[in-house]
Amino acid sequence: MRRRVALALAVSRDLPDVTFVPIGGVGRHSPAEAVVMAQLLEHSGVDRAAIHPVSEGRTTIHSLEASWPYLRERTEGRGALVHVCTDAYHVRRCRLILRIWGIESRGPGGGTARDVSAAAPVARGLAWMTLRDWLALIEDVPLAVLWRVRRRFFRAQKA
């Protein structure tokens, strides 16, 4: 989580009007990941008003779903981008889910991602996490598509 926060801080350095949206529910131990990352952001000097933690969800897609209303409100019609600041092996899946849902995003760019990811776990652990993330795509992509279709269907029903 420290790497993710460090990356978010590095990426946000030159961006105006940044809002941090750390996501992640309670894993094996309390508190929720979003809460821990929000605290790390505050300890790094980020104003509490610029942090919107979303601590619901035990998986990536469920955490992104819980953050959907806030992300959509902040990006729709504003040309704003979501900058996904997570571990290198995880960026692709997060961005793909957001793209399916109609939210434009960027992954970390330049040397920043490499600098922060250099502190990543040893190769064996990183290989396992990369494989785990690719396998999660098999579940998350159909769920993301279904979620978007369901939202469109219910929106059409209301109209």
Image: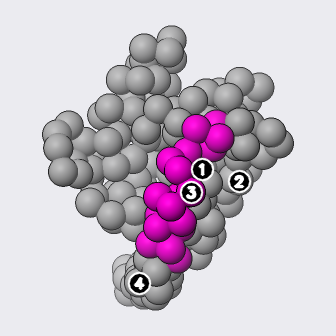
Residue closest to the eye, 53 or 114? 114
> Over which residues does the magenta segment extend?
116-134
Q: Which residue is mark 1?
A: 84
Task: Please give the label number shown on residue 106.
Answer: 2
Is residue 79 shown above or below 112? Answer: below
Under circle 1, the secondary element is loop
Q: Quadrant of the C terminus?
A: bottom left
Under circle 3, the secondary element is helix
**Dominant secondary structure of the magenta stretch?**
helix
Tell me residue 38's x, y (percent): 38, 29
Among numbered discs 2 and 3, the one appearing first in the sequence? 2
Q: CA distance from mark 1 to mark 4?
A: 20 Å
Q: Amino acid at mark 2?
A: Arg
Q: CA distance from mark 4 to mark 3?
A: 25 Å
Among numbered discs 2 and 1, the one appearing first in the sequence? 1
The structure residue drawn at horizontal position 47% and vertical position 67%, both measured from the top left corner, is 128
Residue 126 lies within the magenta run: yes
Q: Which residue is mark 3?
A: 123
Tell me residue 153's x, y (percent): 42, 87
Number of residues whose C-alpha sits closer than 10 Å to that of mark 4, classed few (under 14), some (14–19) or many (20 or more): few
Q: CA distance from mark 2 to mark 1?
A: 6 Å
Residue 155, quarter of picture: bottom left
